[in-house]
Amino acid sequence: MYWLKRTFHELTNDELYQILKARTDIFVVEQACAYPELDNYDQHCVHYCLKTDEGKVIAYARVLPAGSKYAETSIGRVLVVEAYRGKGYGNKLMEYIIGALEEEKTKIIKIQAQLYLQAFYESFEFKQISSPYLEDGIWHIDMIWANDY
């Protein structure tokens, strides 16, 4: 397994296709949620993947820079492909991304978390900052991670 960290313009066609397919398979099909998956933020993100040695996406998330979607840096579209769930890859993904953002001296990370994953994100020291709300038929909360350097 290996990590891939690329800007939109550094992604190959095959990498981009795999990412978009995994996101659509999970967030649109599996969660039965019709929403605009392609939202014009991908071009401005850094994309993080954990891939098999054969190049198959196992886990993925994107990091939006501060000032794009939110005033703060944001992690979004966090996923683990179904066949690889329950093996700690979501934890590894979040540890890797938060570590990379800490190296960049990021002080605040904002996420829009699905409510059922609240405890998962709290394990990385994210704190709830909003009441639960429905977005695209799924309950969410906003959460913040802060680091004082």
Image (cartoon, grey):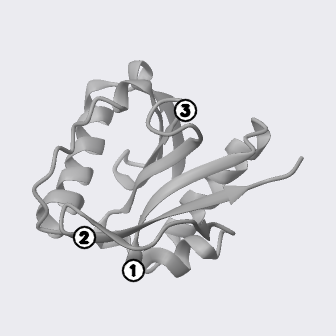
Q: Residue at x 25, y 52 (%)?
A: 22
Q: Hey, what amino acid is under mark 3? A: Pro
Name the quadrant containing residue 140: bottom left
Sequence-wise first label, 2 or 3? 3
Query: Considering the numbered disc 1 on the image, is that residue within a helix, a strand or a loop?
Result: helix
Residue at the far right: name it.
149
To which residue does mark 2 refer? 138
Sequence-wise first label, 3 or 1? 3
* In contact (CB < 8 Å): disc 2 and disc 3: no
Q: Hey, what amino acid is under mark 2? A: Ile
Sequence-wise first label, 1 or 2? 1
Name the quadrant containing residue 31: bottom left
Gap in Å between the C-alphas at discs 2 and 3? 25 Å
- Pointer 3 local density, CA inside 10 Å: few below 14, some 14–19, many at least 20: some
Query: Considering the numbered disc 2 on the image, is that residue within a helix, a strand or a loop?
Result: strand
Q: In the visual, does 59 lie left or right of 95?
A: left
- Examine the rendering and report whether any part of residue 50 can be seen: no
Residue 76 shows which numbered tag? none
Residue 65 shows which numbered tag? 3
Q: Residue at x 61, y 75 (%)?
A: 122
Q: Nearer the viewer, residue 39 or 58?
A: 39
Gap in Å between the C-alphas at discs 3 and 1? 25 Å
* In contact (CB < 8 Å): disc 3 and disc 1: no
Q: Position of residue 64 (x, y in %)?
A: 49, 37
Q: Residue at x 17, y 44 (%)?
A: 36
Q: Nearer the viewer, residue 129 or 43?
A: 129
To which residue does mark 1 refer? 116
- Pointer 2 local density, CA inside 10 Å: few below 14, some 14–19, many at least 20: some
